[in-house]
Amino acid sequence: MFGLKIFPLKLSSLLFFFFLLISQLSFSQSEVANRLKEAYNTKSIDSLLKFVETYPNETIYVQEAKRIIDQFAFEIVTQKNTIEAYEEYVEKYPNAVQTIKAKQWIELNSTKLRQKEEEKAYRRAKEINTIKSYNEFITEFPNSKYINYAQDKINEFQYNENISKFSIEELTRFLIQYPNNPKNKFLFDTLQTQTLRYLSYEGLIFISKNRLFNIDFENFLIQFATQYTQSGETKNFEKLFKDFTQLKSNKKLNIQYQDAKTIESLLKMSTIDDRTYNTHKEYFTTIKNDKSLDLIKKYLLPLIAQKKITNINKVLQTVEDDFRVKQFQQMLFQPPFPIHSQERISYNKDSTIKLVVDSKTSGYGESDIYVSLKKDDVWQDPFILPKPINSRYKELSPKINKEGNVLFFYSDNGMTNSTLDLFVSFRQDNDSWENWSMPLKVSEIDLINANKHYNKGYVKDQDNNPMDALVYIDDAKTGERLFVSQSNPQTGFFAYPKQKNNVNIISISKGYLSKYYSQAEDLNIKQNSIDDMYSKRIILTIESIFSEDMPDKLSNSAENYIKYLAKSLQGLKYIITISVHSQKGYKALDQQGISWQQATLIKDKLISFGINYENVVSAGYGNKNPLIGWEGKNRIEIGFIIIGGVSN
């Protein structure tokens, strides 16, 4: 015990000197000495302090009393043996002889004891494992080696307790409430994605006022404005121009605004006659915005009433690459849709999946479809179905099959054939609710047999990335267009009704090449980037598009393929090379002769579809250049070169 080792003499020696001192004092001081002796015998600091107060002028006795107080107080500290006790002693008795020893003890033992207390406090914080427990630990030990761990746990709790749905409201609230959370960069990026996904004006306003993490706000604003005004509502343009005056100088946006005003004025007309059509023809032959579909439909209504199919197809020809137009066209004169129910909640057959129609500011449109799953007899929180199921329009009256992979619903999405059209969509991955096929218009609800009546597939590029593209299903013999589908932009997944006849299936995008595919359960359409083919010197090899019965003529199916090929080539800088390989002759032509004739037919047809003759090189090789894997098969090889900057 440090307290009893401070002096070379122990208390018994101190007492000896104390009585020796008393014996040497005059008789008149004996009463004071007796009072000091009595105070000492009580072993009480309070008694000694009272003595000092009673005899303040008795200097020699007061000094001795204070020395005894210092010693008594120090003995108490050594018994407690804590940092706080020693620190309190140093503060209360700064001039005591023992204070030097107290400071030495603190220096030698405080670090070790503090570490033990710190370890104990951190274990306690971990056991409680709450934001409060970790905050209390940080407050008590601000310089602890565990500070980063504790702060990480606090950040983790903040995130897990406040972020679950990634809604605009949730994200903005978190960014305001926890400005230093390390997840904020991710959450701010997510906020941008969600703002564009749902076209949330609230999200846009927040981002404009909180330009965090060096966001290129002007570029983001243009992205938002482009999508936000696609609806064709002039009020959306005017709202943006008011809140973001810099957009007034955007030439493209102003042109779109003028187009929107023109379309709105045309839609207000009671009827659209041929004169109006010809005067404003660009608004009927180009999709300017979503209201263009209403305008085209308004002009078509009299033609539809008279069933002038040829005239209808002619009007739609210039906008046939828009899937909404294709669906409208495919459903013309089909049986009427069954009347939709008004129910906003529906269940699958065994009541494990609940569909809810709801209107929320965080949704996609006027009303959206949400899903809630039952787990352990408890309904989980509902989550919104993604695009392309939900849209900026109304989605209503959903019905889902028992397995949860076939969904029927009503919507006024796009160019409608009725007030509300009936759609079907298929979920590809049973472990995810994100991968749905592009909804297809149908005329009846059949939850049980839908999977049997449709095939599914994917459209991918050469690197296996999903592609947004139309998928054409043509009769293999006649070339007749049987159906047009479209792939999901996010996943490339698509569906189409099974056909009775043999079909050619192809997907075409500008700047990409594809070949014909046959109907199959697992259909993967591969599109090859022409830029990639050129840079890597890749040749696309396809089966001959000529029939064996009439190899000297182009069938309707062959013409279709060349038309698709021409659509892929429009505006490209490359020269396309067509190499035809034939294994046998036809009539008076040998293998090389028939292959040259076929190559010439392909070239001429490409030119007739708008490809510059200088950009097409064709040749026939007969059976002179065999290729492994193609033994005995007729083939066509397509490649690309650049010679002297020739362009179409």
Image (cartoon, rainbow, N blue to C red):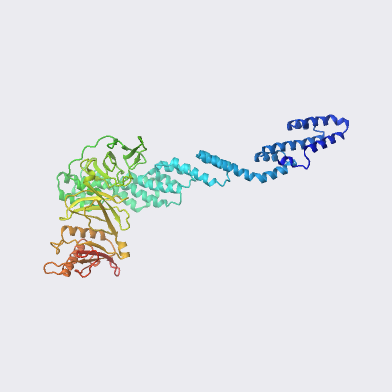
Nearer to the camera, 405 or 185: 405
Task: Please tell me in which quadrant of the rendered image residue 16 appears.
Answer: top right
In the image, residue 54 lies at what x, y percent?
79, 30
Identify the residue at image location x=28%, y=43%. 405
Left or right: where does residue 584 sit relative to residue 125? Answer: left
Q: Is residue 399 above or below residue 250?
A: above
Task: Please tell me in which quadrant of the rendered image residue 38 appears.
Answer: top right
User: In the picture, which quadrant includes the N terminus?
Assistant: top right
Left or right: where does residue 141 sit relative to residue 31? Answer: left
Q: Is residue 571 above or below residue 354?
A: below
Work out which residue is located at the far right of the displayed protein and give it. Answer: 26
In the image, residue 412 lies at what x, y percent?
26, 42
Task: Please tell me in which quadrant of the rendered image residue 399 appears.
Answer: top left
**Number of callouts in the render?**
0
In the image, residue 131 lies at what x, y percent?
50, 40
Residue 324 shows up from this direction: yes
User: In the picture, which quadrant includes the C terminus?
Assistant: bottom left
Left or right: where does residue 387 sit relative to residue 79? Answer: left
Nearer to the camera, 395 or 2: 2
Residue 648 shows up from this direction: no
Left or right: where does residue 169 sit relative to residue 61? Answer: left
Q: Is residue 197 above or below residue 618?
A: above
Nearer to the camera, 477 or 531: 477
In the image, residue 37 lies at what x, y percent?
80, 31
